[in-house]
């Protein structure tokens, strides 16, 4: 079969990493896979899987990519178009303009629309264009509940398939050292986009309390986002400023994650944060705020530390202290990931669903 993945860009994080994992798994089973993006291989120059056929639509904005994607669909003739979130609108319009009925669209929802900064636009796409696709993947039970309760989309049209991870690739990349970044001996880390939903002022405040007790520890901030400059300005007024390092987005975050003492996630909302699964695969203990995604993955605190609020920095600091003193057993975390999130298992779930 011929699969075509479509997203606005190819960056490290979120939906793109999930799709690249699916792409690698599908190619390992002998399928032909194309990845289409509005821009050139993302701001990070991702290490794309071997044999993945990548297409850049010309560095255009998503809204202007309909006719370019249409031409590519007619050229490639995919059996299944895989997209997600707001890119669903463009994928659907492009398909309709080909006047071909044999192109099937499988879309996926990776976030809660009420926490989206373009709420009206996202809600419009969910309401009017998701139902026009052939199948919808929800990355978590919470997302499936949202689709059912707010948009009347249910099984068998919708299926929950948790995000897969390529454990072998993560293992391999985790031992690749990044030569241009000098790492401290002891550090905790955040990995993600620097946007308001990530609650990063709270993270800095909580780390400051932690730093008072552990002055030899650093906080490694990995990622980019429009809030970065504001956060750096805020940090400059903090006593712990010299122990918080902004190192930008990294093509290989696993090298940094592998040596981290803790992974910190302080978001207001997460549907199914893949970074938690990736950390667990490397045996790293996670400390989180009580998002639905974190509670789902960590099974209400059985496999990580979850506080009760989104704004109690003392509680988060205490959870960091507890996690540092009593980390989860690495082998237990690894075994859980291998049982629930292996790429082979998720690829089979995916193929069974899209072909049903």
Image (cartoon, rainbow, N blue to C red):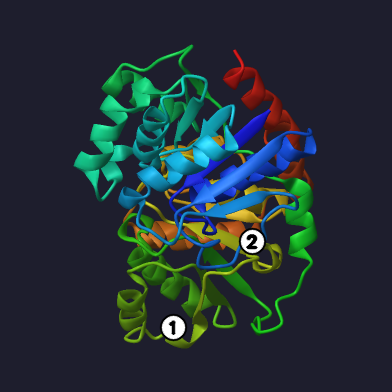
Q: Position of residue 120 (x, y in %)?
A: 19, 40
Estimate how packed mark 1 is, as few (under 14), some (14 to 19) or many (20 or more) residues with alpha carbons within 10 Å.
many
Estimate how packed mark 2 is, as few (under 14), some (14 to 19) or many (20 or more) residues with alpha carbons within 10 Å.
few
Who's the residue at 46% across and 19% down the image?
101
The answer to which image quadrant residue 113 occupies is: top left
Taking the image as shown, residue 41 lies to the left or right of residue 308, namely right
Q: Which residue is mark 1?
A: 240
Image quadrant occupied by the C terminus: top right
Q: Which mark identifies residue 328?
A: none
The relative height of residue 149 versus residue 326 in the rendered view (above or below) is above
Q: Earlier in the sequence, mark 2 or mark 1?
A: 1
The relative height of residue 140 versus residue 305 in the rendered view (above or below) is above
The answer to which image quadrant residue 150 occupies is: top left
Who's the residue at 58% across and 78% down the image?
217
Taking the image as shown, residue 183 lies to the left or right of residue 43, namely right
Q: Position of residue 38 (x, y in %)?
A: 44, 54
Taking the image as shown, residue 214 lies to the left or right of residue 150, namely right
Q: Which residue is mark 2?
A: 325
The relative height of residue 87 versus residue 196 in the rendered view (above or below) is above
């Amino acid at each position: 079969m011929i699969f075509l993945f479509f997203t606005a860009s190819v960056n490290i994080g979120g939906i793109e990493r999930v799709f690249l994992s699916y792409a690698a798994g599908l190619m390992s089973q002998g399928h032909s896979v194309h990845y289409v993006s509005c821009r050139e291989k993302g701001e990070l120059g991702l290490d794309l899987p071997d044999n993945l056929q990548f297409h850049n639509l010309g560095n255009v904005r998503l809204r202007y990519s309909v006719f370019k994607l249409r031409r590519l669909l007619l050229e490639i003739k995919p059996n299944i178009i895989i997209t997600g979130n707001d890119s669903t609108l463009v994928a659907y319009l492009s398909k309709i303009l080909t006047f071909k009925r044999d192109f099937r669209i499988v879309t996926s929802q990776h976030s809660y629309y009420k926490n989206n900064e373009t709420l009206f636009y996202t809600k419009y796409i969910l309401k009017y264009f998701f139902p026009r696709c052939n199948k919808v993947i929800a990355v978590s039970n919470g997302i499936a509940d949202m689709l059912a309760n707010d948009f009347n989309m249910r099984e068998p049209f919708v299926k929950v398939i948790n995000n897969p991870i390529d454990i072998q690739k993560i293992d391999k990349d985790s031992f690749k050292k990044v030569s241009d970044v000098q790492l401290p001996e002891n550090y905790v880390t955040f990995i993600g986009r620097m946007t308001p939903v990530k609650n990063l002022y709270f993270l800095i405040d909580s780390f400051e309390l932690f730093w008072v007790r552990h002055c030899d520890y650093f906080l490694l901030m990995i990622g980019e986002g429009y809030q970065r400059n504001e956060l750096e300005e805020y940090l400059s007024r903090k006593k712990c400023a010299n122990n918080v390092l902004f190192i930008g987005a990294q093509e290989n975050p696993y090298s940094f994650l592998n040596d981290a003492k803790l992974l910190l996630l302080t978001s207001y909302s997460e549907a199914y944060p893949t970074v938690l699964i990736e950390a667990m695969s490397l045996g790293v203990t996670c400390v989180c705020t009580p998002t639905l995604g974190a509670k789902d993955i960590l099974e209400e605190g059985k496999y990580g530390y979850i506080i009760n609020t989104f704004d109690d920095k003392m509680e988060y600091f205490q959870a960091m202290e507890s996690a540092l003193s009593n980390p989860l057993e690495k082998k237990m975390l690894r075994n859980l990931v291998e049982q629930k999130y292996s790429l082979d298992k998720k690829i089979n779930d995916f193929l069974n669903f899209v072909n049903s």
